[in-house]
Every structure is written in structure tokens, then in C-alpha cells.
Amino acid sequence: MNRVILSPATLPSSALAEIKQWLGITTTQDDGALQALLETALDLFESFTGQRPLESECEEILDAASGWLTLATRPVHAITALYAVRSDGTRAQLAADRYDIDLDADGTGRVRLLTNVPDRRIAVRFTAGLAAEWDDLPPPLRHGVIRLAAHQHRERETEGAAPLPPASVAALWRPWRSLRLA
């Protein structure tokens, strides 16, 4: 997947407070490291489930082809723009009458070009994510992120890496996991 996060989600202080409470930490000494662990846990959630947890603005580069082109990121809420990407990297926004958009109930986003794109690549801008804010995430999902970040914090000085996510976290996240047949 050739995706760029244009506007990443920002974790509020309540997320940091949750992991600190879980770990029993009262100082600010580890705040930066804990914040990074939370962000990594959110990325691992996306890898495990195939769904972006927090809403953000994204862009994917696709090969222009006939028929419907499916975005890899899910769940897509809105496709906001398409650009023809030239071989030299410059872009030209496509008029809305040059493509169709399809958003499925399961969060899959698709685009279909109605005219040819000379350089055979397009950039699709869209908004995707399960929840707009940290506090809007379903409690089992959020708890799994906290548990995974706490697990990584506790294991930071041990040798070898255990499989991620741990079984307790995978059990919390499994209802959001979507598998696709290739």
C-alpha cells in the first residue's frame, strides 16, 4: 500500500492518563515514551484488524486503470479529491465529472475513472477511521491499545520480542478484524 497520512489523529491527554493509571505511573518522566507506545499500539491495531482506529486525512497512490479501484485503508468516510500524478511528480486535480466514488457499508472506498489519465497514476485523498476521537473508540478497542502499550513498556528491557499483539489484546480486538481473500 502506498499511503501517506496527511493529517494524523492527535491523542488527547486522557489517553496518556489512561496508560499511566494502568501502569501506576504518577510522574511525567516517561510521558514521551508512553505517548510513542500508544501511537505504535494504534498502528498495530490497524495492522491486526485492517481498520484505521482514529480518523485522519490520508492519501493513496493507485495505478490508473479501467474499472473500480479499491483503497487499501478502511473504513473510509469520505473521498475528497483525486489527482492525476505525472511521471515528474507534479499533480493536476481531476474534475468531479471525471470519476465516480463508491463507499460501501463496510467502509471500503472505491473510485472509478470515467476518462483516461495520461500518466497512469492517481492520488486519492480521503478521510478514514473508526472514531473521530480517542474517547469515541469502543471500550474494548481502547482497552486493548492501553494494554498493548503497557505490555511494551513493561517488556522494554527484556531480551527477545514476544509475538504481538499478546493473546489478551488480540481477544479484545478480534471483533474488529476483517480478513480478505486474495
Image: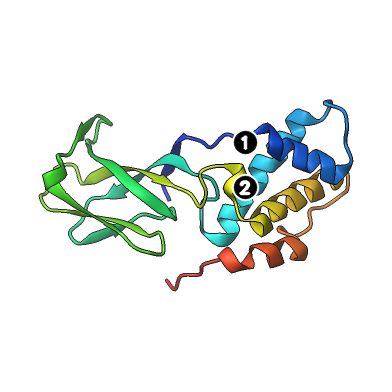
Quadrant hosting residue 70:
bottom left
- Write the residue at 17% across / 39% down: 94
User: Across the whole image, how many numbered discs are drawn on residues?
Assistant: 2
Front-lying residue, 137 or 92? 137
- Write the residue at 11% across / 46% down: 97
Bin the neighbour count of mark 2 within 10 Å (Cα to Cα): few under 14, some 14-19, many 20 and up. many
Say above or below: 40 vs 66: above
Front-lying residue, 123 or 25? 25
- Write the residue at 79% across / 57% down: 162
Q: Secondary structure at mark 2?
A: helix
Which amino acid lies under the numbered mark 1 shown in the image of this protein? Leu
Could you tell me how far apart the alpha carbons at marks 2 and 1 are, in whole angstroms? 10 Å
- Write the residue at 56% across / 42% down: 133
Front-lying residue, 159 or 12? 12
Where's residue 145, x and y in %?
69, 50
Residue at the spot of label 1: 11
Q: Which mark is residue 74?
A: none
Residue at the spot of label 2: 42
Nearer-N-terminus badge (2/1): 1
Quadrant hosting residue 67:
bottom left
Bin the neighbour count of mark 1 within 10 Å (Cα to Cα): few under 14, some 14-19, many 20 and up. some
* Left or right of 5, for residue 19: right
Task: Check if mark 2's residue and mark 1's residue have beta carbons within 8 Å.
Answer: yes
Where's residue 106, x and y in %?
41, 64
Say above or below: 129 vs 179: above
* Left or right of 178, for residue 161: right
